[in-house]
Image (spheres, rainbow, N blue to C red):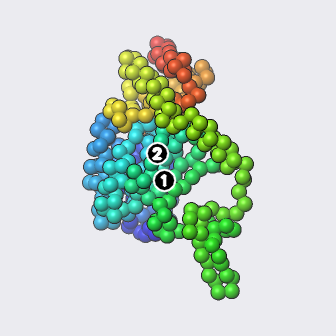
Amino acid sequence: MPLVKGDEIITTTHEHVALNIPLLNQIKRRGVIIKYFDPDRKNGLNNVKIINDLITKKTKLIFISHRTTTTGQLLPVKEIGELAKSKNLWYALDGAQVPGSMPIDVNNYNVDFYTFSTHKWMLAPRRTGALYVRKDRQDVVAPITVGAYSDNGFNIKDGSLNFQPSAQRYEYGTQNELLFFGMYESLKFLNSIGLSKIREHNETLSEKFYEELKKTEGCELLSPEEREYRSSMITFRIPGKNLNDITGAMGKENIRVRPVSEADLNGVRVSFHLYNNMDDVDKAVKSIRNYLKS
């Protein structure tokens, strides 16, 4: 993107390392300024005001998670998109934790760029993913690494190079087609069930888990209190206990959870998808309660 020294990017303190490191690299490479905010987990819509208060004449880009990797918080992406549009700012979403778990509509979000890996909720092979760039923004995002198939014609005699009039300009060379056939089969599988059904299934489980942890003395829930901004990813912590001790204890019972060290949360995230059932909820709750007793 055409960013220069002094340009400002707004993001949250709850981003995944996959966004944090590239943003920090922009500080080193170009001297941009990153402005962070802590997401409001009690009043989700207040995040629009928080972002608005950070915007200055130097702000160029808002880049946040559609759903945070830390607490599973769904941010008010449509309203933030409307704010970005009113301020003539670029707006990007990291969607790694969303596609495959619920329907999405990039047009409804007023988003310019939407990026996600597909090995998570979409159940596709690793090293597959997608970058959506709104058509009228394709000349804003310059291809950095290019090669065969990025071009729409070139001439070494006069030095001319035309890029493809589509997102193909950002891809190049011979790819590992097997990975993308695998991604295609994952898409077919998810669509055969239906993303709305998947979301209903996942959040039936996560809401049961959330309610059980609310009744569990010694557990502190970190995921949003408002149902509208809560998802199938629920994060908790046990004050005074290290996140790695908790994940280790649950791991011994073959329960795969994620430690959440970002933003010093010292939390543990439990995620529910179509391959889980209510027995898994009960098992996770029991494991946490047994850990507290011990």
Q: Which residue is mark 2?
A: 104
Q: Secondary structure at mark 1?
A: strand
Q: Secondary structure at mark 2?
A: loop
Where is residue 274 shown, x and y percent of the image?
56, 30
| Residue toward you, 35 or 128 | 128
Q: Residue at x 40, y 17 (%)?
A: 216
Q: Which residue is mark 1?
A: 114
Q: Residue at x 45, y 48 (%)?
A: 105
Vertically, is 48 above or below 58?
Answer: above
Gap in Å between the C-alphas at discs 1 and 2? 11 Å
Where is residue 290 shown, x and y percent of the image?
50, 14
The amino acid pointed to by label 1 is Tyr
The image quadrant that residue 191 belongs to is top right
Can residue 24 be seen here? The reply is: no
Circles 1 and 2 in contact, beta carbons < 8 Å:
yes
Q: Residue at x 45, y 22 (%)?
A: 209
Report the number of numbered marks: 2
Left or right position of 189 against 54: right
Q: Residue at x 48, y 18 (%)?
A: 285
Left or right position of 222 against 18: left
Where is residue 10 shown, x and y percent of the image?
37, 55
Can residue 100 be seen here? The reply is: yes
The amino acid pointed to by label 2 is Ile
Question: Mark 1 or mark 2: which comes first in sequence?
Answer: 2
Vertically, is 132 above or below 236?
Answer: below
Where is residue 223 shown, x and y percent of the image?
39, 32
Left or right position of 100 against 221: right
